[in-house]
Image (cartoon, rainbow, N blue to C red):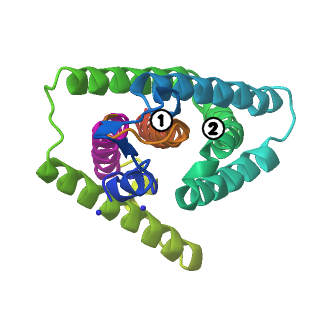
């Protein structure tokens, strides 16, 4: 997914490769500010994607609580959302079209999964949503006031930990498909809970990388479509964080 974020497209190389060429006339730059990436523009587009995701999530949520099997749109949403992420990572200029599509299909997945967990553990979804929101706001505040600084060493540690988690998840999933072995993180033991806490911390640290890369993209005057690209990347991290909170709370609840 140089790789400075968990997201396959939020990285320095990707942002740099999409920088607008600058035209100079007598040492004066000709700049069309309406065609440049801005932090505020990215925030606005993140809000739009969030609303689309929530609207789509309500569909599969409603289906579940009205006796309609949500598995088809839930699984389909996850698959299509993943495909859109891959396409966007290679074609950032299509992000204005792919990002809303990602939010729509990922919303179907999130709504279905959330409803299934809510049926088994009432109240778990609102707690996971609250934990995700608080984590996001805390990380945003720490970054905004430069309490946490995104240095090269910071990036290296977070990226290495993220890749380690992704590799562990992938290997565990493949092995569990062909054997009777149950991965530790599937259980509700204290070790499994500890793993979930660690993953949540790493997911939260990825938010700092996302903030930094979005700010850097605006500073380097990337083209306007990169606002959708950055917003999509931030949404991916938030979805990951939410899913991990949901898993952690499920493990804790199942021990009661």
Residue holding disc 2: 110
In terms of depth relative to the viewer, which is nearer, 159 or 225? 225
| Residue 92 at x, y percent in the picture | 55, 52
Screen quadrant of the N terminus: bottom left
Q: CA distance from mark 1 to mark 2?
A: 9 Å
Report the front residue among 98 and 179. Answer: 98
Of mark 1 and mark 2, the one earlier in the sequence is 2
Relative to 175, 62 lies left or right = right
Residue 239 image offset from top left, x and y in percent = 51, 39
Farthest bottom residue in view: 178
Q: Main secondary structure of the magenta part?
A: helix
Residue occupied by mark 1: 242
73 versus 235 height, above or below: below
31 vs 58, left or right, is left
Q: Is residue 234 above or below residue 183?
A: above
Placement of 159 over or under 41, stated as above or below = below
Quadrant of the drawing holding the C terminus: top left
Crowding at dot 1, Cα within 10 Å, few <14 / some 14-19 / many 20+, comes out as many
- 195 within the magenta span: yes
Give the quadrant of residue 118.
top right
Q: Name the secondary structure under disc 2.
A: helix
Extreme-front residue of the structure: 26
Residues at discs 1 and 2 in contact (Cβ within 8 Å): yes
Q: Is residue 45 left or right of residue 61?
A: left
The span shown in magenta is 190-218
Which residue occupies 44% across, 72% down?
171
> Residue at left 44%, top 34%?
249
Residue 179 vs residue 170, the one in the foreground: 170
């Amino acid at each position: 997914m140089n790789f400075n974020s968990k997201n396959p497209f939020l990285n320095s190389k990707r942002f740099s490769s999409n920088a607008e060429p600058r035209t100079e006339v007598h040492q004066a730059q000709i700049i069309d500010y309406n065609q440049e990436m801005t932090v505020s523009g990215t925030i606005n587009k993140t809000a739009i994607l969030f609303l689309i995701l929530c609207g789509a999530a309500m569909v599969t949520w409603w289906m579940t609580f009205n006796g309609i099997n949500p598995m088809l749109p839930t699984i389909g949403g996850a698959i299509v959302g993943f495909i859109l992420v891959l396409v966007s990572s290679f074609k950032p200029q299509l992000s204005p079209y792919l990002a809303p599509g990602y939010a729509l299909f990922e919303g179907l997945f999130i709504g279905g999964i959330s409803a299934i967990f809510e049926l088994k553990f009432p109240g778990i979804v609102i707690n996971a949503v609250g934990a995700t929101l608080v984590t996001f706001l805390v990380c945003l505040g720490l970054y905004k006031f430069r309490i946490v600084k995104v240095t090269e060493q910071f990036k290296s540690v977070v990226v290495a930990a993220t890749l380690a988690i992704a590799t562990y998840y992938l290997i565990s999933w493949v092995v569990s498909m062909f054997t009777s072995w149950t991965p530790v993180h599937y259980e509700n033991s204290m070790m499994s809970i500890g793993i979930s806490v660690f993953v949540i911390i790493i997911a939260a640290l990825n938010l700092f990388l996302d903030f930094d890369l979005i700010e850097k993209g605006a500073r380097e005057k990337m083209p306007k479509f990169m606002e959708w690209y950055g917003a999509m990347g931030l949404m991916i991290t938030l979805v990951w964080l939410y899913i991990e909170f949901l898993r952690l709370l499920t493990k804790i609840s199942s021990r009661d």
